Amino acid sequence: MRVSFNEKLIAYLTLISGLCVSAVAVYYSVAGLAAIFASAVVPIIIMGVSLEVGKIVATVWIKQNWSIAPKLIRTYLVVAITVLMLITSMGIFGFLSKAHLDQSMPSGDVVDRLAVVDGKIQTERENVDAAKRALKQMDDTVDQTMARSTSETGATRAAALRRSQQKERGQLQNDIANSQARIGVLAQERGPIAKELRQVEAEVGPIKYIASFIYGDTDPTILERAVTWVIIALIVVFDPLALILLLASQISFQNFRERQEPKEEETPDPYVADVGEKPIAKESVEEKPAYEPDEGPLTEEQIQQIREFSKVYSAEENELDHRELNIEHWTKLARSRRVKMDDIPEEYLGEVKRRV
């Protein structure tokens, strides 16, 4: 059967896709294992690449040789491939986790810097509030002094009290002005840090939406849990998908080979197939037995009639032609399994066996 272009295209795309996914999985896995065992990066890379290539080759080999491979080898390869898939998944998990941590570390650093600046601003604001409260208390004291006296003496005392507070009031007002000036400087310092934080938060924004969708909260703990589940979802379909695509492509190629290989012509079973009838002499047609042919085995009576029929021909003048006719007749019956070899006359048995 002819293989269409679309079928070949899909098969090759499946193979290429499987190899690409497998190559990416190898890279992520080796990078993750190297991050886990950071003190031996080069040996880990060599070991990881070798194991990943061996896993792919073992998967394809066991698929093609499943029926002829010994059971022990099949069992070991299946277990080894499964373990290697787990190792690959562990490496991918380590790689993606490290990537998330690398992304989270700048965010934490920016948050800390922003928190320091906000703390300084808060301190200056508290200083301003304290100075304002002190000024208000002085004003309340002057007002109370004036309120306790209805004469000019009370006003004089209040004025004298305000004059005595003049220096302290000036100091408090200077403190307020200085604090407000420092708040302005800190606000300018805070601007770039806040912008950087917004950029970092924009990068982790999608995972926040996922955490909010699943857990209804974006607490840091919940956020880390959401990241973990996203990574698990990725590794579940990463390496297994690569191996399944490779197996699927091999199944397609095997199907193509089976459909394109010419089928061997079936040799007819000499004991079942009808090889056709040879021309029979006119006298043989006229002297056929009186019974009707049937599809089942011949009865003893029919066999006896055939023997008598053969004897009649043996008595004819052209004994050689009649012998050939009888041999051909018995050969046909033997091929169709309507008679057994033991039922064939001895004079024809050798030739019939040779022809059958």
Image (spheres, helix red, strand yellow):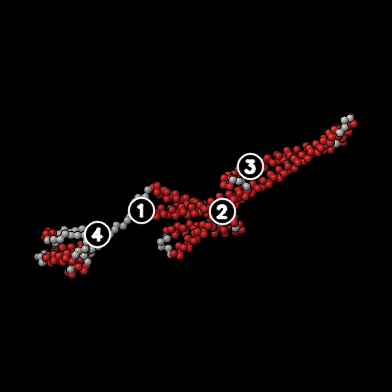
- N-term-proximal mark, 1 vs 4: 1
Depth check: give the residue in front, 215 or 306: 215
Lateral position of residue 55 relative to residue 143, left or right: left
Between marks 2 and 1, how big is the CA–CA gap? 42 Å
- Residue where numbered disc 4 is placed: 273
Of marks 1 and 4, the one in the foreground: 4
Q: Of discs 2 and 1, which sits in the foreground? A: 2
Whole-angstrom CA distance, mark 3 to mark 1, is: 61 Å
The one nearer the camera, 226 or 7, is 226
**Residue 155, quarter of picture:** top right
Residue at (9, 65) in percent of width and height: 317
Label ID, residue 93: 2
Q: Position of residue 21 (x, y in %)?
A: 50, 51
Q: What element carries label 2?
A: helix
Q: Is mark 4 on a helix, strand or loop?
A: loop
| Amino acid carrying mark 3 in the image | Arg
What is the CA distance from the residue labelled 4 to the residue labelled 2?
A: 65 Å
Q: How crowded is mark 4: few (under 14 residues within 10 Å), some or many (20 or more)?
A: few
The residue that label 1 is drawn on is 259
**Mark 3, secondary structure of its residue:** helix
Q: Above or below — where is 157 with respect to 283?
A: above
Quick check: marks 2 and 1 in contact, CB under 8 Å?
A: no
Residue at 53 percent across and 53 percent down: it is 235
Residue at the farthest left position: 317
Q: Is residue 53 left or right of residue 263?
A: right
- Say which label, 3 or 1, has the lower sequence index: 3
Residue kind at label 2, given as amino acid type: Phe
Labels 2 and 3 touching (C-beta < 8 A): no
